[in-house]
Image (tube, grey):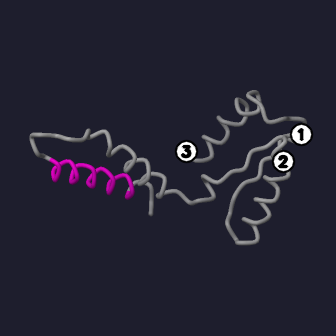
Amino acid sequence: MPPKVALAACIVGIFGLMWLDRDDERRTSRALWIPIVWLAIASSRMLSQWLSLGTGEFDSCLEANRNLSRMLGEKGIQHWLDVRPGAVHDWPLWRETFPEYLSRIG
């Protein structure tokens, strides 16, 4: 589904749900519809845009990430394995990679 169509459907859906939930004695918050928005937007993207495995060359999770990457590849699931040279699994690696990962899905 194209992102603009998903967003429009999501907006219409949320307002529709709010209209259905228009009783005066509100037992739940309308903020509970926020996850629905997130799911609609997330489902409008290809899985490969979201699915990235980030790890460092000396990361304790490196082998597990490589195994998962291999299994995903065998199943034909597109993904991105990002192994950073000389890095370990710590905050500087996250700080370095997070903006790049966000730019891939934006």
Residue 5, numbered circle: none
Residue 103 picture location, percent across and down:
61, 41
Q: Residue furthest left?
A: 24
Please report the residue visible at 64 percent of the width from the left and 54 percent of the height from the top: 51
Q: Is residue 39 magenta?
A: no
Residue 106, numbered circle: 3
Disc 1 marks which amino acid? Phe
Q: Quadrant of the C terminus?
A: top right
Magenta residue span: 5-21
Magenta stretch, main secondary structure class: helix
Residue depth check, mark 1 versus mark 3: number of the one nearer the observer:
1
Disc 3 marks which amino acid? Gly
Kindly identify which residue carries mark 1: 58
Q: Is residue 17 magenta?
A: yes
Q: Nearer the viewer, residue 17 or 98?
A: 17
In this rendering, would 43 be left or right of 96? left
